[in-house]
Image (cartoon, helix red, strand yellow):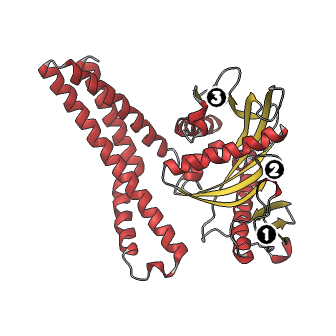
Amino acid sequence: MAGPDFDTEIKQLQATMHTIGQVLDLDGMRVEIADLGEQVAAPDLWDDVDRATTITGRLSAVQGTLDRYNELLGRIEDVGIMHELGQEEGDDDSLEDAARELEKVKKAVESLEVRTLLNGEYDAREALVSIRAGAGGVDAADFAEMLMRMYIRWAEQHDYKVEVFETSYAEEAGLKSATFAIHAPYTYGTLSVEAGTHRLVRISPFDNQGRRQTSFAAVEVVPVLEQTDEIEIPEDEIKTDVFRSGGPGGQSVNTTDSAVRLTHLPTGIVVSCQNEKSQLQNKASALVVLKAKLLARKKAEEKAHLDSMRGDVQASWGDQMRNYVLNPYQIVKDLRTGYEEGNPSTVFDGDLDGFLEAGIRWRRGSEKADA
């Protein structure tokens, strides 16, 4: 890359970082970090575990974003110096290293820029993800389990905590449905673009004739509620059932009726939780899930965007948002954004950031077009 072009790229990156800094409100972040730091230092912090977890999680997230911003500023300055020294010394290797580092920095800046687009009312919340098998029989159930693993692997790569509330196993293989939370700020805003129907095309491992099979799974993403959210559910509107949780293939896991199923009678929404050994704990967790779904429903009805908030889709032909093709060729392609990856294995192993960033930009563009 020629000197002037390189210098122009550096200046553009610096200008983008200045804009990002204004959107993030760096001074406000520093004030918040100081305030949260004082709260974390309080000797009675862990007397309220939920509050302590919220405070420490928020501090980690804000500090992480500020550190990331400052690190990128330093990398931009360093790559500029690296290129300048390479030119002065006529060192082609150094110039090539600078060019490669510039591309890496550009991608990192783009990623941070996407974070500034997460400014919706609930975008800063943690995410509650539900997956259910759609059309396609046992292949669809297997696909649902593959998607659950994909999102959990993505969370693990980012050091986000995952809490599984419910897994309903299919008889032969895979999952009928699953619900789990990803505990990290902004995971709702980030993962909400995953809501919709996902389609898998492959040679079925369950077909002894080796035929190609198309299957579907639906993904729903809603925000986790906080204590300040006012969602009250009268007791007479909830039907409670208890049962024994089961494992793959109908295998019994618990010998007591500790699993809980809640049915919200006015809406018909059903949630289950079997993660804890205590029936009381499972009921409390199921209530958290139910309230989150009711909040999403309420918000969606207010804005008349039920599909976009709850991923309320049929999980069948004609409404898929992403294709995962393993045969006769290999590709994962998002039908809304056009973003694609040629290695499905890495995607199923949690490499989702490219799809998420493209989805967030697409959503922002759609919102502007509708405004």
Mark sitting on residue 260 = 1
Q: Secondary structure at mark 1?
A: strand
Q: Residues within 10 Å of mark 2 (few under 14, many from 20)?
A: many
Q: Which mark is residue 166?
A: none
Q: Residue at x 48, y 53 (%)?
A: 159
Q: Quadrant of the N terminus?
A: top left
For this orientation, the residue located farthest to the left is 89
Toward the viewer: 173 or 365?
A: 173
- Residue type at mark 2: give it: Ala
- Three-letter code, disc 1: Val
Spot occupied by residue 260 in the image (x, y as percentages of width and height): 79, 69
Ranked by sequence position, the earlier of labels 2 and 1 is: 2
Tell me the mark number nearer the camera, choosing from 1 and 3: 1
Which x, y percent locates residue 181? 63, 58
- Label 3 CA crowd tier, 10 Å (few <14, some 14–19, many 20+): some
Quarter occupied by residue 203: top right
How far, Cα to Cα, is label 1 from label 3? 38 Å
Seen at 31% across and 45% down, the residue is 71
- Alpha-carbon distance for marks 2 and 1? 18 Å
In the displayed structure, would residue 305 be above or below residue 295? above
Q: In the rendered view, tell whether residue 100 sits above or below residue 287.
A: above
Q: Are marks 2 and 1 in contact (CB under 8 Å)?
A: no
Q: Name the one closer to the observer, 193 or 92.
A: 92
Q: Which residue is mark 2?
A: 170
Q: Which residue is mark 3?
A: 333
Of callouts 3 and 2, the N-terminal one: 2
| Residue 172: percent from left, percent from top | 82, 46
As measured in the structure, the alpha-carbon distance from the residue carrying label 3 to the one carrying label 2 is: 27 Å
Circle 1: is it few (<14), some (14-19), or many (20+) Cα within 10 Å? many
